[in-house]
Image (cartoon, helix red, strand yellow):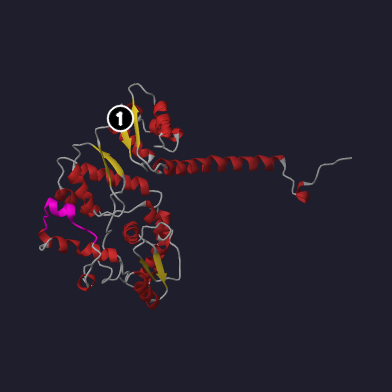
Amino acid sequence: MSQDLDPQKYHVLTPKKKRILYLVLLLIFFVLMPILMSIYYKSAVFRPSQTSKEANFEIKNGESVFEIANKLYEKEAINSEFLFILYVFLNRSDTNIQAGTYKIPAGTSLVGVVDQLNHGRDDISLTFIEGWRIEQIATLVSKEIENTDYQTFVNMAKSYEGYLFPDTYFFNRNESEEEIIRKMRHTFNEKTSDILTDSNLEKIGLSKEDVVTMASLVEREVSNKEDRPIVAGILLKRLKEGMKLDVDASAQYSIAYSRLCEDVENCQPSKDQIYKFNWWPRDLTLDELGNKNPYNTRAVAGLPPSPISSVSRSSLSSVINYEDSPYYYYLTDENGVTHYARTLEEHNVNISKYLSN
């Protein structure tokens, strides 16, 4: 003869407790799912396409968003038809897509693709490289876009060093310096909002400005994404212990203008000068390495006053998620391989081994 089990004795869920459990699970599901979906969506629409080649295709008059999505996917210009359609309709971009023949650069994000389709085939495509300084960005802008001026761009953008996001953009041929800067700053805020959060900044104990500055050093020092968290950890450890950071890129940044112009304060270089100039010279003299410019971390302890270049998501993430290691020193050889050392003696051996001619 069967009988009901005692809930107290055998830990059996009563109908009431089951209802409470179901409600809690439903609540967790409906709270967490939108958050997780939002994180995935933001990450996916900014993720570069997987193709390594330029995509050429044509949009004909009257073609639907679904047909366009299929064409783009077949050309590997986008990673997902569904995400393309979703993004277009959520941003009400469907009525702005223009007919014509397009060339989509390899690695363009879904947002970049839609931006190009919205602006039309007559717009200029400019790609700004990660780790460029303001002057390099200004050089490309003034060279490719009519009615823009190199010095005007530099003067307007100088206080935003590090905050103009490196990416492929599509600009109108009559775009102004101010509008270009605004677009690049807006893209920086959009693409870094999930990294430069209050919780991440609190975790690392640095301000947003200091994280971007540190990321710019990492950006210029190492190109290998696997090495960046290690190098970031070394620099953060040296900063915490009051050691000089000894970043060569900061010395390069600090002395560039003195090589470009005799009168640094009133430097007005010609177009020929800026098109040919090397903003990151490697042949630094002992005097240049010892220059007490506040940006030169080879001579002055602490972080530079502001970033020294544009920064990628990779370099920002490496600072937030830095890797602890026993190392205090590093160098990158001519093949792009980074070598680490625990002591100055080990580091000097690495210099003799990997950098001496």
- Residue at the far top in the pictured view: 62
| Residue 275 belongs to the span the image colors magenta | yes
Q: Is 239 located above or below residue 111 in the figure?
A: below
Is any part of residue 242 visible from this angle? no
Which image quarter holds the C terminus?
bottom left
Which image quarter holds the N terminus?
top right
Counting every numbered tag in the picture gives 1
x, y percent for residue 237: 39, 69
Q: Quadrant of residue 159?
A: bottom left
Q: Which residues are magenta?
A: 267-280
* Tag 1 secondary structure: strand
x, y percent for residue 99: 31, 26
Q: Nearer the viewer, residue 63 or 324?
A: 63
Q: Nearer the viewer, residue 339 or 233?
A: 339
x, y percent for residue 281: 23, 62
- Residue at the far right in the pictured view: 1
Left or right, residue 295 beside residue 327: left
x, y percent for residue 211: 35, 59
Q: Quadrant of residue 171?
A: top left
Q: Is 293 located above or below residue 194 in the figure?
A: below
Is any part of residue 218 visible from this angle? yes
Q: Quadrant of residue 265?
A: bottom left
Which residue in the structure is indicated by mark 1?
Answer: 101
| Residue 351 belongs to the span the image colors magenta | no
- The amino acid type, in three-letter code, at marker 1 is Thr
Q: Residue at x 43, y 30 (%)?
A: 70
Left or right, residue 115 beside residue 229: left
